[in-house]
Amino acid sequence: MHSLVEGLLQGNKRSAAKLITIIENQEPQKEEMLAQIFPHTGNAFIIGITGSPGAGKSSLVDSLIRTIRSENKTVGIIAVDPSSPFTGGALLGDRIRMQEHALDPGVFIRSMGTRGSLGGLAHTTRDALRVLDAMGIDVILIETVGVGQSELDIMNVADTTVVVLTPGAGDHIQTIKAGIMEIADVFAVNKGDLPGADKVVTEVEAMLDLGCHTSWRPPVIKTSNLKQQGINELWEAINKHKQFLIANGLWEENRKKRFEQEVLEIVELELRKTIHKKVVDTPLMHEILQQVLERKLAPYNAAISIIRQGLNLKI
């Protein structure tokens, strides 16, 4: 483990790949490894790319890599793919679309299956980000699975979130009215060479006019991977958002909020494990559940009794 961490801190891709595998497989040394690399994190600019299936997120990420690399910055990509509900496996196909960068020493691409996570990311995405961050990557792009209106996990890990829309994908008002509007820092209307792209731009701008947003108004950039149009403008808009966050003291504040949420999530997870270990399948549990079954005790009161008697907690 020590040699893997040392290799990672020296920028070794093989070490990074092995450490992410340890994270995904939830191996026992995972926590120790994360503790060792954590002091070396916090330097990467993390950008989330999200949107509906077929919006061209992978192709857009591919074009962004080319633009970022032209500035001589290193790039890490975490592409999250859906896992099969039947086999648990995933076709990690996004690397196929990014073959142009596979041999670039300044690019690291990793695909991850969701493994049952429903928020657009894998459960282990946040920890995998830290591996790439500690490796010294300048910019990390996270491509979520194709999402709808409620899969908004990306806002809890990314500094800047790009929502990708595309013409010909149905009612865009329906797409952006619930949740997605609030998490977008930049809108990319992809496949901008297709008919209807200008209409999508107009609809999004109209929604922004109606919405209550902060002093940052998300720009709407029309892009085309086929014609390589709008990619530089999109990268410029992403950087302007970063500059806005820093200038207004929001860069560190947002990261602090994300750490707070992460710590609370871990607390809840560990408490859940403790409850299962100390309470589930115990005589107390069976006794209280029997009272619920006999309608002598309501479920809420049963839960309070379990907490007080099984865990010795006062609430």
Image: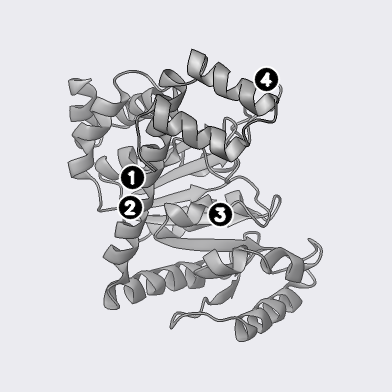
Question: What crowding class fits label 1: few (fewer than 14 Cα within 10 Å), some (14-19), or many (20 or more)?
Answer: few
Q: Are marks 1 and 2 in contact (CB under 8 Å)?
A: yes
Residue for badge 3: 152
**Callout 1: helix, strand or loop?**
helix
Residue for badge 2: 260
Residue for badge 4: 87
Using the image as rendered, state which of residue 241 and residue 138 is in the foreground: 241
Determine the residue positioned at 48% across, 49% down: 142
Q: Is residue 136 left or right of residue 173?
A: left
Using the image as rendered, state which of residue 166 and residue 163 is in the foreground: 163
Residue 17 is situated, as x and y percent measured from the top left of the image, at: 37, 28
**CA distance for labels 4 and 3:** 25 Å
Determine the residue positioned at 64% across, 81% down: 205
Residue for badge 1: 263
**Callout 2: helix, strand or loop?**
helix
Residue 21 is situated, as x and y percent measured from the top left of the image, at: 41, 24
- Disc on the earlier residue, 1 or 4: 4
Image quadrant assignment for residue 195: bottom right
Residue 206 is situated, as x and y percent measured from the top left of the image, at: 67, 83
Question: What crowding class fits label 3: few (fewer than 14 Cα within 10 Å), some (14-19), or many (20 or more)?
Answer: some
**CA distance for labels 1 and 2:** 5 Å
